[in-house]
Every structure is written in structure tokens, then in C-alpha cells.
Amino acid sequence: MKVKDLVADTLWSPGSGYSDDHKPAVSILLPTFRRGASGLFRRAVESVLNQTLNDIELIIVDDASVDGTADQIAEFMRVDGRVSCLRHPRNIGLPAVSEYEAFSKARANFIGFAFDDDFFYPDALDQLLDQSLKYPHQVWYGNAVWRIREVGRPDGLVTRLGRSLSSFNLKSTNPIANCTVLLPRYVIDRVGLYDPNVLMARLCDWDLWRRISEFYLLQHIDVDVAEVTGPEQSDSLGRTYPLVSGACEEWMRVATRDLRPESFSDIDVFEIPPGLSPRTSVAIADLTESHCAKRAWMSSLKPSVPDRLGKNVFVLSADYNASTTLCFDYLPRSVRGSVRIISLDSGASVSELVEASCLIIVRYFDRYREWIDLAFDLSIPVYYFIDDNFTELSIKEKLEMPEDFSLAALRSKLSRFAGVLVTAPALEGYYLANLIHKNVFMFPVSYAKAPIALRPERSLPADKDEWRADLTIASIGGPHRQLGLQEKVIPAIQRLAAEGHRIHFVISGSGEDSRLPRILQESKNIKFTFKSTQVDWNRAILQLVEYRPDILIHAPSETVNNLYKTLNVALCAYLLDALLVVPDAEPYSVPGFDGAAAKVAPAKEPRAWLEVLTKLIANREGWGDYKKFNVSFCRKQFSGEQNVAVLNQILETLPGISSTLVETRLRKLYLSKQWVGGGAPPDAEPLRASLHELSALRSRIRRYRRFRPRLSREDLWPQVSPVFDDIRRYLQDNNIRTPDSYLELSDAIQGKDFVEYLIPIKRGTLDNISCAFSSEGIHEGTVGIELVSPDGRIERQVAIALDAGASLQLPVIFDLKGLAIPHDGMWRLRLFARSRWPIYALELARYSHLGLARRAAAPFAKVAYVDQTPDTGTAAERRGVGDVSPPLA
């Protein structure tokens, strides 16, 4: 359903002060739903209208409230002409759609967001606007105060949401509250609005901040903007909308929808675009079904799921730095959705590994020990990614490392790993030559996206006495380049300045680099700007974009690691549209790079740097050739094609992530000695909730089959363990198993009275019936059968208690001795379970010709008579034990 269809009947009531003749300073957008009776809505509106910044407009979007909210809106509009209203005659339930409607009526150049349970401090908008006007090409946000109710604390526990992005990557966590941001209109025009897809209802704000951060600097101002009370409300967004975090993360990495205002109305809010994993597609389909079921006016939809099993690459990073970003964030879209990056500082749980096809750890080992051990325990292959030669650095330069990277230590640590991913040919050769690992893959820097476009306007604060430079030179690099910068490059720049060139020198570096102003303070014609290193590589580039450098210098370094470095500095120059100047040394001697940068030789001599820079200044018209060559080099070198080939090779032999596999891993995780540490078992509730969610997911996938006739089906028949051969032979010999039937798991039966099947029973005396059940939970409760005669009498009911400590890998055998069958006929076999955990029965299913209907044809069961040869195994094995874990080999 498209946005324009959702909002077609929206009623627009402009305030008395709404006029095209006046553009307010700030427009505040406030969607609301049923907050009038609680008093929160009135409190929120009054906090906006009572701002010290008077030149504002407030556009309220009422999503069909029926609690008196509409009357309160009318009251506000009567007394304050700055209030306007959009009203939905029927509830839509997607705040992102309401924000779009409000934005379409907003007139200001700066846009603020309010929720109906926020309270703004009186001067908040004044302070945000003041900062935004000083730095018009940056996006500013402040703090949100969150009061958490707690027993024994009358005023609650106060916490703040909001901090600088300099020390972490925004992709790992979201510290920005909606109400604390003031967005320039031009940012929305370029990046778009909140994503209205039903999947993103909970995280559409985080998605927007991440999209903005690709093009603009998000800057924190330490100002308390508002109090948020939404998390405390029982009907808040966070409590009423499901959050499927893995699916949302994939969506934020892969989705490429046009969310700009001019295209927004044509967006389908329930769309499942191609290229998503099956689990994410199913999540959207399920959320769509749930959303529409609560709103009768919405058309019935036919959600579908893909006909393949997804495979997931988990990348584990300590701090989500440039190493992770440059090789995994900007992969080609064909594989980007299969890659999920997890940063340790995000607070992610190690239990998320149950959905991984493989695990890649970045640069280190010891800090990932818990994840690595669990991956091995769950038979998940682990790969190591490295973009530096830590071994040579520790041996030849005596650098202190956070852990042991000696050759012997590397061989030992990697002995169980499936392979190593390296970023440079020399590093590949080093690992192979030293027998560190036999499987080494070249995995270079990847940047398969459009470059950051430079803005034509100056980004720096306006200043009547602004110092004007003839040439802006930028430098970027690690701490090891600081000495070369200070002793080789700066003397050359000082000489240029002494000769009359006005130079703005911008350094992006570490704390040591910040001392360079003392060296340059006596230098005439030089302005120095220092920008601290950012964890987020893209943010570091944006810091330099602000100054639009003409030349990007990579200072010389004597480190042995040069041979193993990547040429990502060429990518930096490409994104900055700057001429690159580098030493004529490693790693810049790779084939195809000549002509992409001006090279300095000998790089140890300041005179050589002076000569190269002097020639470049004298021949500016020749810079275009360097830049054009570098663009061509970067597009080829960093295309990501090699990365795609490696990931496809890794994933080729790995199984798809099915619900059954996830359940198996969850139970193994819960029961493993390593997980419980030999102590008391952990709380079972999270595991139980996960398994019930997966149980519901399996049922939904089955339900969606009728919309996808060609959807592939998982036939468990070939995978069944040999201990079930007696049942298999019985089903084949009696023609119950047919070529058009599939052995599948039933829907979960523990929440039903029973599931019922028709089975043929011959004249004679019964001995037992053996069945197969499956569960990945803790084995507690009972499973049982009822045998119902053709005339409807329950002839026998048998239940078996499940032992939580048993290894249940055999059929469940129900004793029926003494039950005489007078004549052949079709009897009804009822299977039931009583447990807090999901339990399934194995059953044979058949599908109609078009695949639109599924029928459970028969249970995976065998009927045995007293005159038959007894089954192999002891009586205890035959009667006392039933396996409720998957009966697969």
C-alpha cells in the first residue's frame, strides 16, 4: 500500500497564522495518537508553544484519536495561530507517514521533531537554532533527559541520551533522540525522511541519522533539549511495535529506496524488495499481516517469502573502526545484505551467533574469546580478518601489542579457523610463506557506492575577517606518520609560505599531531587547523570535506608495515576531490597506481617535498590528469568484486539458516557446560521466548506458501536418523509414504488440545504405536496419544513424561498391549503435548497441484501388533524414552 493511498483522506486545517507570506524560523512536527486523556499531549504542546523562540510553527498530525485529543487540538488552534493540524479519519499507525505529511506543510528552513510524550525545555529550540545558524552545513543535536521510575526513588532515575560521535561509530548504537535534532531542510531534500516501511517503525529515526551521517557531520551540543517519557508508557511505540533487530540492521545496510519528499508518496509501506534474506522478508510479511489485522479498513494483502534459505556472515569488530568500515560497510549490494557487522561496544549478545553461517573476527583474538568458543561449539566456521602485519611490527619495531602476535602464537590461534582474510598481496604472501594458515583470501578495501559530493558553498562559519588561503592542504594518517609530517613535510610548507603562498594546513590526526601549532605559530602566511581522529572513517572524511582541500598529503613513514598497507588514502583523495601527494615508496608502487598521485623522491628530504609542491602550484591545470587517473584507479581497485567472490566461495558449502537449525543451536547454547559454566542453569525465559517466536515463524512461513506455489519445501525424509528406520519401512511397506509427500514438522502442538490423523489399523491385538516428536527446548512435560475408533470412542490414551536430562534420540513408543481391534478400519490417532516449550510432531504432508493447499496426510508413526517381531533395543529404550529433539542424522 502506497503512502499516497494511506493519506488520501487526510484533513488539513491550517492555523490562523499559517501564510505563505511568512516563513517561520523553525517548524515542529508532532504526530499524536490517543495522548489527550493522559495529559501528556497537552504538556507536550504547551512546552513547544512556550519556547523562548517565538518564531515557530507547530504542525500536529492526529492519527484518528478518539480520546478527546481532537478537542484539545481545536482549543490550541483557537488561542494560538501558530498551530496547524492534519487529521486522519482512520488510524494509519505509521509515525513516519505522519512526519512526511507534516513536513509537506512545514514552511521553515529548520525542522524539529516532537513526540506527544516529550516535554521541551523553554530555551531548547533557541540554543539549537543558534548553533545551526553558526554552522549551517552541519546537523546539530542535544541531550534528552529520561526519567525512569524506580521503587524507592520518588523522582525516578535520571539518565541522558546524547553524546558526541567522535569516539564510536553511529552504526553500532544510536545516542540521538528524535526531539533533540534540528534538521536543515536541504538535508531532508537530499537524504530523505523517516523510512515508512512497517519493518522500520521502531528504528526509522536511527536509520535516518545513519543516512545523514554518510553526507553530513552530525554534531553534538551539550544542551538538555527535552524530557522523554515514552519508554514509561504501556502503549508507547517501543512497547506496541515489534522490533526485529537483525532484520532492521539488514534493511539499513541494503535498502536503497528514494525517501526524498518528492518521491515519498509513491513508497509502498509494506514492500518486500528483492535482495533481502528470507528471514527479513518473512519478518516484513508477518508485520504487514499483523498491522493490517488491527486496521479493518486496510486492504487484505498477500505477503510472500523467498524460495531460498538465507546465509549470514557475521563480522565481529572491537570498536567499528576504519578496518571494519573500509572492507565490510561498502560492499556491493549483492552481498551487503548477507553481512551483519556487530561491534562489541553495541552490547550485542553472543547468543545472536545462532543465526550466523560463519563468523569473521577483525584484527584481534583475545577480546572475542567468548564468541570464538561459542562459534566452534556450534560448528560455525570462523575466519580471521587482518589489514596490518602485527607480527613484524612487534618483532622489528618492538611495538607493544595488546596480545601475542608471534608466528607461533598466530599458528596456534588460527589452527581451528577456516581461513584468513587479508587486504594486501604482501600480507597474503607473508601468511602463506610462514605457514600461518593454508587458506588465505585476498579481501581488499571495498567502496561500491557513490562518492561523497562536495557542497558548492563554504561550510565554515561566516566571518567578516575570515583568513583567505591560496591553497588548502590536508593530511590524514596514523600516528606513525607524525614524525615524517613534522620533519619532512612541514618544512616544505613553511618555505612555500615564506615565498608568499597563503596556505591553510588541515591535519586529521591523533593527540600528538595537535601539538604542531607550536611549530607553525611563527610561520607567516600559514593557518593551521587540527581535527581529531574519528573512530568512524566516513566521519573523518566528512571533517576534511568541510575545508575542501586542494591537496591531500600522505606523510612518509619508516615503518616495516608499509609493505602490507592498503591504498585507502587514494580513496580518501577521490572522495575529497583532492590531488594526492605521496612518498615514492611502498605501498604506492602497486601496478596501475602510477599517474594517480604525485610522488615525492627521496621522501626523506624536505627539499624533495618542496620541489614537488612548487611544481604542482605552478601547473594547476595539470592536476585534472592526476585526479582523473585516481578516479579510474579507485573505481577498479575498490569495486568490491574480489570481496564478493571470496564471500560467495566461503558461503557456497555452508547450510542455509533455517528455523530448525536456529532452534538446534539455541538449545545447544543453553545446555552447553561452557555456557552455564558448571553452575546453576541460566534463566530459561529468554530461550523459551526465542523458541516460541521461531515456532510461530515456521507456521507463518507455511501459511505464506499458498501465495508462493513454487516455494521450495524442506523434506526431512533423507535426514532422519537410522534409529527411525522401522517407522520409515512401515510407512513405505504400507504405501503411506508416497512420491508426492514430504516429511515435515507440524505446527507446534503443545498449545493445542491435539492434532489428529487418520491411520489404517488391521484386525488383531495391538502392541504399541511409535511416533517421532521434535523440540529444541528443555524436555519437560508430557507427550501422548489418543486412539479413537471409527465410531468415535476413545479406546486408549497414553502419556509419557519427558525427562529434562535425557538425550532423546529414539522414537517415542506408546504401550497399547491388550487393545483388541475387531476388524480392519481407519482410526484416528491424536497426538498431544503439555509443555512450556514448543513441541512438534513429524508428519507427512501433501500439496495440491498448484501448491496452494497443504494437507497433513499421515503421522510419522508405526503401528505394531503383538504377533510381530519385537523392535530391536531394550524395553526401556522402546517404552520409556521418547526423543523430542529433531530425529535427524
Image: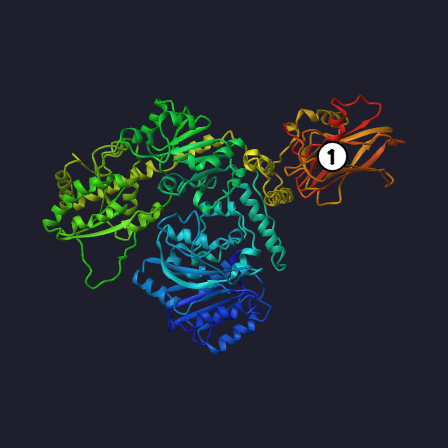
x then y, percent, for residue 812: 73, 32
**As shown in the figure, which amino acid type bears the numbered disc 1?**
Pro
Front-lying residue, 710 or 530: 530
Displayed quadrant of residue 626: top left
Instruction: Residue at 61% x, 59% y: name it.
Output: 295
Relative to 574, is 152 above or below? Answer: below
Q: Which corner quadrant holds the N terminus?
A: bottom right
Relative to 532, is 379 above or below? Answer: above
Instruction: Residue at 40% x, 34% y: name it.
Output: 385
Instruction: Residue at 45% x, 28% y: name it.
Output: 417
Front-lying residue, 202 or 604: 604
Q: Is residue 105 visible?
A: no
Relative to 184, is 725 above or below? Answer: above
The answer to whether residue 347 is left or right of residue 386 is right
Instruction: Say how many tags the image has.
Output: 1
Q: Seen from this angle, which residue lies furthest bottom?
A: 79
Q: Mark 1 — residue?
A: 859
The answer to whether residue 112 is left or right of residue 467 is right
x then y, percent, for residue 356: 51, 37
